[in-house]
Amino acid sequence: MISLSTLATFSIAVLLLLCSPGPNMAFVMTCGMQHGMRGGVAAALGIGLADTLLTILTACGITAIIIAWPPSFDLIRYAGALYLLWMAYKALHKSAPVTQAANQTTSLRSVFARSCLNSLLNPKALLFFMVFLPQFVDAHAGMVTQQLLLLGVVLTIISTVFHALLGSFGHVIRQALMRHAKVARLQARLLAAVLSLLALRLLLMTR
């Protein structure tokens, strides 16, 4: 299988990539600011689920098939941009903050689902898994599929913990903002702005 030195190198590379600003980082921090620590963790878990699904697709060779079809890149990024713009619209037209536990649970489920779908509708994520993971696979050691799955599990764990910590940082910012008036409207506008910028980024994205 994979040596410990390879896993260590892979883990360091993943951490370095995660530290570079990106849509997931912005989305998780914004969710932490809007929904508190639980919202940030829910967003992190959504990204973790997306990473798990992309790992399975990569190990099965499906991501390569999708990327090989020329229109796939544009179709995925257009769908992702439209989805982000729809979420921005929903953020601006959101009703008053919820207080009941049932509504809070529903809101966290929504954050989890949106975070997962946002990651899956990012064509760069498909390219990342198809190009990055295989670099750490030793074809001579055999069991390539198992190696890809193991690397995907390690990546998912690191990514989930990293984004959960980011969500907690967003919660700290939220606590500071709570001292000011009209913070709910400010959070909604901030979330809408972030989502709109991410949508623009997808529309301008090239292979």
Image (spheres, rainbow, N blue to C red):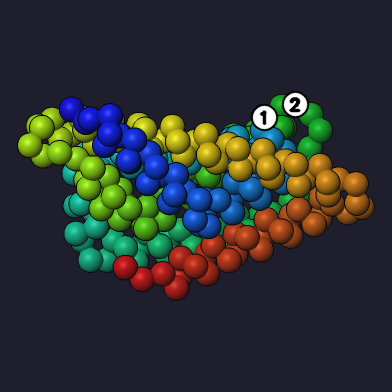
> Hey, which residue is sitting farthest front in the picture?
5
- In the rendered view of the protein, which quadrant contains the C terminus? bottom left
* Residue 8 appears in view: yes
In-front residue for pair 8/25: 8
Tell me the residue at 32%/41% (across/down): 9
| Residue shown at the point (28%, 50%) measured from the top left | 132
Measure the C-alpha gap from mark 2 to mark 1: 6 Å
Which amino acid, mark 2?
A: Ala
Asked if residue 134 lies left or right of residue 27, the reply is left
Which residue is tagged 2? 101
Q: Is residue 81 above or below residue 39?
A: below
SS state under label 2: helix
From the top left corner, tell me how far across and down residue 161 is, in percent: 52, 34
Q: Secondary structure at mark 1?
A: helix
In the depicted structure, whether residue 50 falls above or below residue 185: above
Q: Give the x, y percent position of residue 162.
A: 53, 39
- Which residue is located at x 66 percent, y 33 percent? 38
Task: Name the amino acid, label 1.
Answer: Thr
List the residue tagged with mark 1. 105
Of residues 42 and 152, the one drawn nearer to the viewer in this rendering: 152
Q: Residues within 10 Å of mark 1 (few under 14, many from 20)?
A: few
Say left or right for 131 vs 107: left
